[in-house]
Image: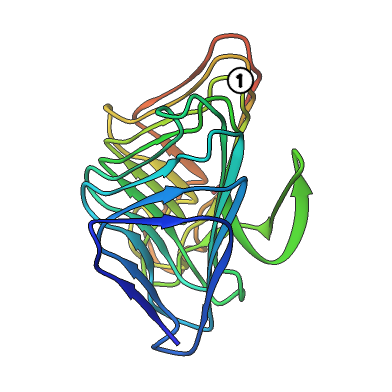
Amino acid sequence: ASVNVTAATIAINGGAVTTTGAGTGSQTYSGNITLGSASTVLNMRDTATAFTLASNKSITNASGVDASLTIKTTANILLDSGSNISSVGSGKKLNTVLWSDSDANGGAITLTSSTITTNGGHLWIGGGSGSTTWNGLTVGDGSAVNPSAAGNGITLTSSTVSSGIGSIYMNGKGANSTTLHSDGIDINSNTTSIQSTTGSITLIGTGGTNTGSNSNNDGIRVSGSIQSTTGAISLTGYG
């Protein structure tokens, strides 16, 4: 079954929205989403259709309490131009989990001219068919893996990710390709910023296996900025 919501704004007031089915197990939200409870899970299973937060649309914690949002899919996760995930308006934290490739068949994560502001909540971006616990959140046990003939596991273009006192974790793996820039994590524009105040920042990237003459499938490629006021920063790349 699929869910297609065309309202300008939809309020999701708790629990999980789960869709299942090859080719049909998708969730499409044409408008803004407000979160009205402490925990929300948007789960797409057995589908090759990407979860997409549409251009200039938002997901906002409106619960009035610290909250968590999990977007989990067997496919890709896309945050289109001008989209944002935040908890600024409510003044409360929004722990955020972007979990692709939940069936280990490939799923990349791409942020394009978009913003994630957790207001002190934690941010986890990765993949995996199994689960583990990180900072009290249920997350995947692996990487966001690009399923295409070429491409990055995680790509941030002209985007801003900010966690304040919350921690940031990203784990990505590039496609196996003869093409350049099948990187694990690509922070690929100088206007991209990953930042915290006291929260730690951890990036783990594995470049795609190179099967040709090109040799630039990097673990982590950084053209933007990664900064924390006092939090530890760890970058681990395998290329």
Q: Picture coordinates of residue 164 (x, y %)?
A: 54, 20
In the image, residue 152 sits, relative to residue 65, either above or below, namely below
Secondary structure beneath dot 1 equals loop
Which residue in the rendered view is the most extreme toward the top? 229
In the image, residue 108 sits, relative to residue 135, either above or below, namely below
* Residue with the mark numbered 1: 165
In the image, residue 129 sits, relative to residue 162, either above or below, namely below
Q: Nearer the viewer, residue 54 or 129?
A: 54
Q: Residue at x 25, y 40 (%)?
A: 113
Q: Residue at x 47, y 40 (%)?
A: 61
Q: Picture coordinates of residue 80 (x, y %)?
A: 26, 52
**Relative to 122, is 83 on the left or the right?**
left
Q: Residue at x 47, y 58 (%)?
A: 174
Q: Picture coordinates of residue 122 (x, y %)?
A: 61, 35
Rendering quarter of residue 30: bottom left
Q: Picture coordinates of residue 7 (x, y %)?
A: 25, 63
Amino acid type at circle 1 is Ile
| Residue 80 appears anywhere in the view | yes
